[in-house]
């Protein structure tokens, strides 16, 4: 980031520190809603999605504006935000373009690797004048990252995020980058260009999978699902806390510690 020019977001847009009074922020990204609270910006949040559930006590009284995909544009307009925070994977571009007609500042995020969180902390810290809080998060992330044990021999894993249809993650996703830190290489259908592709249990490549991972989000896989699938496949099936693996922002620090325990 070029401090002289400002702070650049994931869409290449430059932002200057906001000095025009107290910001009014709408977050359409659950993990970033949590991050804003950890940066000390919770009092400036005026809108969130129904999936923004952390911290529970903090978000309870913040108005909901729909989901990450089905945003109520009129509700956002009535909240008169100065800033809207979105994510390339989680939010629809046409929706964001419509919101840009009456929200002055759109901040686009798109972390692809765990270490991208450092730039995310600094971006929001710089825009909203909480650089010291951002630096504390950077330090906490660095400590958790340094504490990761050396990765064992690589394993090929199938990380399931949905069923009916069954869906997994592509190798270039944040989730795959997190799992790679402990030597787990994600499998996805070779003929798919999608970031979250569908797959079939009959796919030939699945014969070489070492273990199957079921995420607790966005689909709410349970231990019962894992036990049933292990019986069918004859392979290890493990339930993982999806928030710890897929949520960037401040949750990523706890996520690194979670990986170390795995």
Image (tube, rainbow, N blue to C red):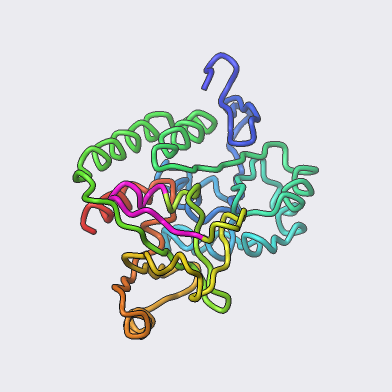
Residue 40 in picture, x, y percent from top left: 42, 42
Asked whether, in this view, residue 53 is left or right of residue 90, the answer is left
Asked whether, in this view, residue 139 is left or right of residue 43, the answer is left
Vertical relation: 13 (above or below) 152: above
Residue at the location (60% across, 25% down)?
16
Residue 177 in picture, x, y percent from top left: 41, 47
Q: Is residue 96 magenta?
A: no
Residue 108 in picture, x, y percent from top left: 61, 40
Vertical relation: 44 (above or below) 54: above
Furthest-top residue in this view: 4
Residue at the location (40% across, 60% down)?
243
Task: Give whichever of 125, 57 is nearer the camera.
Answer: 125
Residue 155 in picture, x, y percent from top left: 30, 57
Vertical relation: 119 (above or below) 27: above
Specify the quadrant of the image occupied by residue 19. Answer: top right
Task: Give whichever of 87, 83 is nearer the camera.
Answer: 87
Asked whether, in this view, residue 71 is left or right of residue 148, the answer is right
Tag count: 0
Task: Give whichever of 34, 20 is nearer the camera.
Answer: 34
Residue at the location (31% across, 71% down)?
238
Specify the quadrant of the image occupied by residue 209. Answer: bottom left
Task: Give whichever of 262, 99 is nearer the camera.
Answer: 262
Residue numbers of the magenta segment: 177-188
């Amino acid at each position: 980031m070029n401090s002289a020019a400002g702070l650049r977001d994931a869409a290449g847009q430059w932002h200057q520190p906001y000095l025009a009074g107290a910001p009014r922020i709408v977050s359409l990204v659950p993990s970033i809603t949590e991050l804003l609270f950890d940066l000390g910006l919770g009092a400036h949040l005026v809108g969130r999605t129904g999936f923004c559930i952390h911290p529970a006590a903090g978000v309870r009284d913040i108005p909901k504006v729909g989901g990450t995909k089905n945003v109520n544009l009129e509700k956002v307009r009535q909240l008169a935000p100065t800033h809207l925070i979105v994510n390339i994977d989680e939010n629809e571009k046409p929706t964001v373009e419509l919101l840009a007609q009456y929200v002055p500042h759109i901040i686009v995020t798109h972390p692809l690797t765990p270490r991208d969180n450092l730039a995310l902390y600094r971006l929001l810290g710089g825009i909203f004048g909480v650089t010291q809080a951002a630096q504390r998060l950077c330090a906490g992330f660095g400590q958790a990252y340094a504490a990761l044990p050396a990765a064992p021999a690589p394993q090929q894993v199938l990380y399931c995020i949905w069923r009916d249809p069954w869906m997994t993650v592509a190798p270039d996703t944040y989730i795959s980058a997190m799992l790679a830190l402990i030597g787990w290489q994600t499998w996805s259908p070779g003929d798919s260009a999608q970031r979250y592709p569908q797959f079939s249990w009959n796919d030939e490549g699945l014969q070489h999978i070492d273990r199957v991972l079921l995420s607790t989000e966005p689909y709410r896989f349970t231990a019962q699902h894992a036990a049933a699938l292990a019986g069918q496949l004859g392979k290890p099936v493990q339930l993982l806390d999806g928030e710890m693996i897929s949520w960037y922002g401040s949750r990523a620090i706890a996520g690194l510690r979670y990986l170390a325990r795995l």
